[in-house]
Image: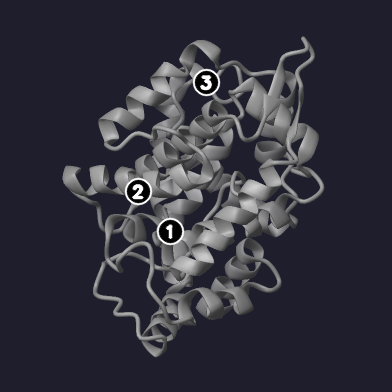
Amino acid sequence: MRARLGEALFRRVAGPDGDRHRARIHGTPGPRWFAPGSPITVVHGDSSMFVGGIRAVLLQTMQPQAMTAVAEHSGYRGDMWGRLARTSRFLAVTTFGTADDAQQAVDAVRAIHDRVHGAMPDGTAYDANDPHLLEWVHVAEIESFLLAHRRYGRRRLDQEGYDEYVRQTAQVARRLGVTDPPSSEAELHACVERFRPELRAIDHARDAVAYLVREPDLPLVARPPYWVLVAAAIGLMPPWTREPLDLPTLPVAHDRVADLLGHAATRTVRWATAADRSHNAALHQRAGVVTGATGGDHNHLMTGTTGG
């Protein structure tokens, strides 16, 4: 049962060609951007990423230009799981893959961004290469991953570890075009706050959230566990986002239940993907990569929809 559940999770998140990409990411010898066991590998290898990824998507919708770009240039309705697989792959390659493969992944995303530009209804231009929009996507994503790991991670980091996590993710952000990404957890939260005056829920945002929360493209049997992860993600959302996005507005009652369910869900994912962790470790060893004992999950089934 564990193997079947773990395989189903892997196929859904990594895509039909996930095995081939996993073998390349973990089995190719060569230098990596980040050392095994460093904070970014601990956070991005943990099952809490399922919750963090959903929270990132929900929060990112609050920036009107970024959300319009997604709505007009992305198939988030018709290709939700394809985008998830591509984003999962981007995070896995840049975190765990060779330096050459990681740079190729960054170059591919920047090439996609070159084609994403247009205008808002009021005529204001948007461009996916705008450093300001890139910074919003980055900080919303990294804050979500960090908060989810603090709440649901198997091995929590100390404050120095979380600050180092933010600094490590900033290395990838700079390569993507963010000019001055935050380099500590305090700077990360302050950066999100600085975006507050421009954040609001446009129709595209409410439509995307309704689709992700209430109408997921999933078999009926898979929807209850998915909704548990969604509830946990909503429990980590800032209170000021709830009403604009039509999310539950009784956070105390909702979040207490969501917290209990979130712990149960992430433990279940961790249990189900134990075989994947062993398989990935074996690939790393054959590639000559010293993995070390990190205490994380290392299943690399990461969520979110911003990288692809």
Q: Position of residue 203 (x, y in %)?
A: 74, 20
Mark toward the start of the polypeptide (2 vs 3) = 2
Q: Residues within 10 Å of mark 3 (few under 14, many from 20)?
A: many
From mark 2 to mark 3, how far is it between C-alphas? 21 Å
Q: Which residue is mark 2?
A: 149
Say which element carries label 2: helix
Could you tell me the amino acid type at mark 2?
A: His
Q: Disc 1 residue type?
A: Ser
Residue nearer the viewer, 68 or 10: 68
The amino acid marked with disc number 3 is Thr
Residue in the picture at 34% in, 80% down:
289
Nearer-the-camera pick, 56 or 30: 30
Q: Mark 1 or mark 2: name the one nearer the start of the chain.
A: 1
The residue pinned by badge 1 equals 47
> Does any portion of residue 87 appear in the rendered image?
no
- Residue 241: give its label: 3
The numbered dot on residue 94 is: none
Q: Name the residue rendered at 17%, 45% in the picture.
A: 160
What residue is rendered at 57% in x and 62% in y? 104
Q: Position of residue 261 (x, y in %)?
A: 44, 47
Instruction: Provide residue 10's location: percent of width, then percent of height.
Output: 58, 69
The 10 Å Cα crowd at callout 1, few under 14, some 14 to 19, many 20 or more, is many
